């Protein structure tokens, strides 16, 4: 099956800093999502982005399907951005493959 | 966010006891999933359903069974709970028809924290 790798595994920032999280996948996908798991454990949808670029406030995401990667940009980070960010990819079937996640800590 | 509820939200049970977790959706999504999340393992798929009475195994299905008798409900049963099944369990849904057409995004419920002593 498809392999999904996320980097970096851990990230520590000061409030106000920008960051880029990366998701590499081993084969073509027809579905890619980014999720944020907050410190209370809730999994929140950020983006559904099998290709192209989307923006939502301080967050944006770009997927380059032909090169098999997706990037999540966080600008002007806030303490509420802390948590784990997951990338999930699907390849034809309805069973997504999740990456191991990037753990982000934003210090005030 | 999608209307997904899980019950109970927290449960402590003893080894050998049967346990059933319930996932309920109000979104009429076709697919439903059960995951467990443990430190160092990320999200692992237990079972999934692609319609009423249609289910299949995921990567960590041993010790678990599921049932889906209605579109809106997906039950996960631990026939005889073991300490290794202490975990946080998430339900998810995907593929539903909304006002903006068919949506393929996956949405997660709030999770159930299960402790087996």
Image: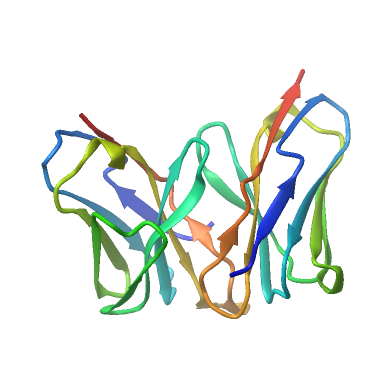
- Could you tell me which residue is drawn at 85 percent across and 74 percent down? A66
**Image vertical order of residue A59 relative to residue A89, above or below:** above
Q: Position of residue B55 (x, y in %)?
A: 32, 74
Q: Nearer the viewer, residue B7 or B14?
A: B14
- The colour scheme used to paint the residues is rainbow
Which residue extends farthest top?
Answer: A108
Number of callouts in the render? 0
Q: Position of residue B112 (x, y in %)?
A: 35, 43
B17 vs A25, left or right, is: left
Image quadrant for the N terminus of chain B? bottom right
- Could you tell me which residue is drawn at 56 percent across and 66 percent down? A96
**Image vertical order of residue B25 relative to residue B22, above or below:** below
Any part of residue B67 in sight = yes
- Could you tell me which residue is drawn at 87 percent across and 28 percent down? A16
Any part of residue B10 in sight = no
B95 vs B101, left or right, is: left
Q: Position of residue A92 (x, y in %)?
A: 60, 80
Which residue extends farthest left?
Answer: B17
Q: Position of residue A27 (x, y in %)?
A: 72, 72
- Quadrant for residue B91, please give it: bottom left
Q: Nearer the viewer, residue A55 or A5?
A: A5
B43 vs B57, left or right, is: right
**Image vertical order of residue A35 relative to residue A25, above or below:** above
Q: Nearer the viewer, residue B22 or B26?
A: B22
Image quadrant for the C terminus of chain B? top left
- Quadrant for residue B67, please give it: bottom left
- Could you tell me which residue is drawn at 50 percent across and 50 percent down? B43
A22 vs B112, left or right, is: right
């Amino acid at each position: 099956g498809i392999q999904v790798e996320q980097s970096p595994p851990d990230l520590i920032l000061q409030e106000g800093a920008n960051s880029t999280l990366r998701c590499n996948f081993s084969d073509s996908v027809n579905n890619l999502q980014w999720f944020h798991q907050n410190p209370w454990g809730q999994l929140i949808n950020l983006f559904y982005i099998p290709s192209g670029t989307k923006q939502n406030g301080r967050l944006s995401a770009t997927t380059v399907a032909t090169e098999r990667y997706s990037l999540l940009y966080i600008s002007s980070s806030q303490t509420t951005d802390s948590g784990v960010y997951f990338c999930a990819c699907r390849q034809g079937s309805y069973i997504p493959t999740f990456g191991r996640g990037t753990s982000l800590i934003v210090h005030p | 966010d999608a209307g997904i509820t899980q019950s109970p939200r927290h449960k402590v049970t003893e080894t050998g006891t049967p346990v059933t977790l319930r996932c309920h959706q109000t979104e009429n999504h076709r697919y439903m999933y059960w995951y467990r999340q443990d430190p160092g393992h990320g999200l692992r798929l237990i079972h999934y359903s692609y319609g009423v009475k249609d289910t299949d195994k995921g990567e960590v299905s041993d010790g678990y069974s599921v049932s889906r008798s209605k579109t809106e409900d997906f039950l996960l049963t631990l026939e005889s709970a073991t300490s290794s099944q202490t975990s946080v369990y998430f339900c998810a849904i995907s593929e539903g028809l909304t006002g903006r057409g068919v949506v393929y995004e996956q949405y997660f419920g709030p999770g159930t924290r299960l402790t087996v002593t």
